[in-house]
Image (cartoon, rainbow, N blue to C red):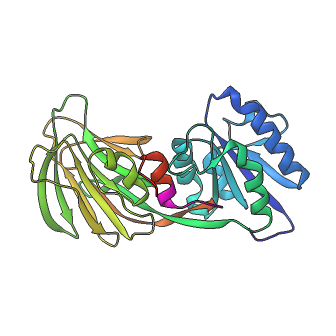
Amino acid sequence: MPESKSKSVGIISKPEKPELAPIIQELVAWFRAREYQIVVDPATAPHVAGMEVIEREAMAARALNFVVVLGGDGTLLAAARAVAKADIPILGVNLGTLGFLTEVPREELFATLEAIEQSCCKLEVRSMVHCKVMRKEACIGEFHALNDVVVGKGTIARLNHCDLYINHEFVSSYQADSMIVSTPTGSTAYSLAAGGPILMPAVDAFVITPVSAHSLTHRPLVVRDSAEIELIAKTGDEEAYLSIDGQIGMPVYDGDRVLCRKSEYQVKLLRIKGTFFDVLHTKLKWGQR
């Protein structure tokens, strides 16, 4: 990390985790000793006094050297959507088992921070997917996702009906529980559970995966990330639901169009060791030599 006269950092934490208190207090002391300006999100604030508290989304307006995320992959996904537009690097600290995104275990946190101070940390860039929802000619929702965009059935519908277009060319009509548009990062999330392929993070592609498709011939489809993907909801009088990274979303109705393309924003993850395949060995129990 390049040195600067003024150093600033943000801390984002998983909500309602009282066991974070001693970690956060030690972390704040470490940053203060090195003359960092510190801002924390509301989930972090109860565990340490005297900090400037701002919402996660407001951190994008600050000139932060990086953000420390304490939690799991879910916390990191939310943080990524908040700060990616400002190109702020993220250090993901996992407080449980190793995540696909949160690489650093608790016991290696301060050694990793020292490596960042010494500019010995590399940046791994992850692409995002941009999604907007069109109702007739009006845009009624716009989102960016690090993992995936999912159009799923509502609570009443037995199957979700969608027409798929790639670059305005009709592909197929799907009857399925859900349709997933996944980034390479998200290929190890919901898409993988639904039978989709694993993509290395640097691959320039999206995966379109039907979940429990009614037709046995419908299989996951890999397309270039320069493509525009369009899903048209065919729900009749029923409701479907759009989910972004499994965390936020909105209902969609018959005729609504979900347009997906590569986002103009990227997520920068701070890494010091290990590879994507090391994570697969650990998380998926793949055999090692």
Estimate the x, y position of residue 108 in percent, counting from the top left.
71, 48
Q: Is residue 81 above or below residue 171?
A: above
| Residue at left offset 61%, top offset 32% | 15
41 sits left or right of 144 in the view? right
Residue 168 painted magenta: no
Q: How many callouts does the rendering have?
A: 0
In the displayed structure, does residue 77 sit left or right of residue 251?
Answer: right
Residue 220 in the image, given as x and y percentages of width and height: 22, 56
Measuring from the top left, give residue 100's x and y in whole percent: 50, 50
238 relative position to 82: left or right: left
In the displayed structure, would residue 120 be above or below residue 59? below
Residues in magenta, as a range: 271-278
In the image, residue 150 above or below residue 18: below
- Is 94 drawn above or below residue 135 in the view shown? above
> Which quadrant of the figure contains the N terminus?
bottom right
Q: Nearer the viewer, residue 121 or 237?
A: 121
**Which residue appears at 26% of the width and 64% of the height?**
222
Tell whether 161 sits left or right of 124.
Answer: left
Determine the image quadrant of residue 252: top left
Where residue 34 appears, x then y in whole percent? Answer: 88, 55
The image quadrant of residue 26 is top right
Examine the rendering and report whether any part of residue 22 can be seen: yes
Q: Residue at x 69, y 65 (%)?
A: 121
Residue sitting at x 44%, y 54%:
145
In the image, residue 273 lies in the stretch drawn in magenta:
yes
